[in-house]
Amino acid sequence: MKALGPNYRISFVGEDGRQSERISGRHFRLDHRCLSEFFYSKLPPLLDDLLRISTSVYVIDRLMKRCQKENGRTWPRRLRVSVEVLEPEFWSSKQVCMALTSCLEFVSGDCCWEFQFEKDCRTQIDDEKAFLEYTNPFGSDEPLVCLYSGGLDSAAGLVRRITACPGRPIIPVTVWHQSRQRKLVRQQFQAIKHKYRADFSPVIVKALMVSGSKAQKEERSQRCRSFLFTAVGGVVAAMQGTQTVEVFESGIGAINLPLMAGMVGSKATRSSHPKFLRLMSSLVTLAAGRKINYHLPFMDQTKGEMVKALAETGLEKLACATMSCVHYPLRERNKQCGICPACILRQQAMIVAGIREPRGTYKYNPFGPSRLVDRIPEKGLRFLKAFLMQVAHLSVLDTQADLPRRLRRHLFGSGIMGHGESPHLVIELLRQYRDEWLTIAAEGKKRGWHWASLLSPTMVANQGGLTHASA
């Protein structure tokens, strides 16, 4: 098998004290080669190291399972990691090591990532002159570098940016670990290119686990996947000479209000959390030697508002071709479950946008015909009920002059907002999100969705109807 990148060794120790070792090229791979080929240049040592470290973190996060507490919650992990890199002195410096560990501990919910960096004496460092001689093929036009996962927000965000900046070159960055994901992303790019004749130069990078633990023995949360994804996007921006990496996530997804008590730490994804992106900006800026920012251009919009762009431009089929399910792909006829938080938020956004999804899109459809809704097991409705409880809590935004204590704690305590910063825009965003749900619930009562009655009648009394609902 052709090598996809450098061979280097990583070792790690978890809570049980046992040391494990993996070798790049034998146990896992990241396709460094496709990045070098894209830029016709070798990666400079520090960016090569950033890819090594982020890939190692991704692998370790998958292999080191979190221990369960008696109440079902998971312990934060303490991990000691050693990685062979080209510039160990740089990564061992106090400033850089603190930037790295702060970023990882925040996004993973772990209490400690302790790093040791060893010199890779087998890989020869190329002259950085090759990096400096890279010729920008886009001329004077600065390309838009963005992360692209193949999900609904990615597709909607990309279309919004194309229509806002027609003719601007675009470099969408994808890191895939399933062949289905790569195929899905390529199909989406073809649909968008056909519609807009957009100037696309996608970077699609493979991240592969070759051997090791079986899938069912891996850690399910895998919170560090986003660390690898954003690191690759940062490397692309640094090589291109672009300052900004755009992240297509709605404001609701970025804020990610906890649905249930205990959905914090590793229980809550922080892949697009504003604080995580600020921490990544600091880390990648150090490695790149130039300013790199991660930007959320749709922070003021709900997912439904973002998806409307696909409906308004005739790309409903593209919206339906995206995948959002936490459990995707299901090993069944249906590839999305319909009842995980991601599926529920996806369906809510599709209804707001007026997009009807094909029958059979979901295994369970809480927004479908009432006879099918009644067949959903009670346990399968727990996340939907949590969303409704969240909506009920947001009702106070119209009656209180200040933020509710619970919401304030989340916004300021988790670093979404800084102290002294006005919450006005966030309040307006959450009101819009709440009203979208209330409109759906009002229509749901007419259609016989029994779960819609869980919201107070006074909350939904003045909400209008919907133009479409899921088939």
Image (spheres, rainbow, N blue to C red):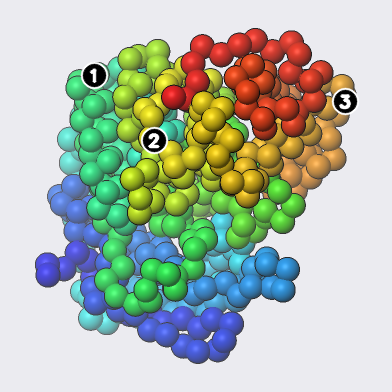
Q: Could you tell me if the residues under marks 3 and 1 are in contact, i.e. CB atoms within 8 Å?
A: no
How far apart in space, not on screen, are marks 2 and 3 (Cα)?
A: 40 Å
- Decide which of 358, 172 is in the foreground and name it: 358
In the rendered structure, the answer to whether residue 456 lies left or right of residue 47 reads right
Q: Quadrant of the N terminus?
A: bottom left
Q: Residue at x 49, y 74 (%)?
A: 64
Disc 2 is placed on an element classified as loop
Q: Residue at x 29, y 75 (%)?
A: 211
The residue pinned by badge 2 equals: 361
Q: Residue at x 59, y 46 (%)?
A: 377
Q: Nearer the viewer, mark 2 or mark 1?
A: 2
Q: Residue at x 27, y 41 (%)?
A: 184
Looking at the picture, which amino acid does disc 1 mark?
Lys
The image shows residue 271, relative to residue 126, as above or below, that is above
Residue 145: % across, % down = 34, 37
Q: Callout 3 environment at 10 Å: few (<14), some (14 to 19), or many (20+)?
A: few
Disc 3 is placed on an element classified as loop
Looking at the picture, which amino acid does disc 2 mark?
Thr
| Residue 400: assigned label | 3
Tell which circle, 2 or 3, labels the residue nearer the N-terminal end: 2
Q: Could you tell me if the residues under marks 2 and 3 are in contact, i.e. CB atoms within 8 Å?
A: no
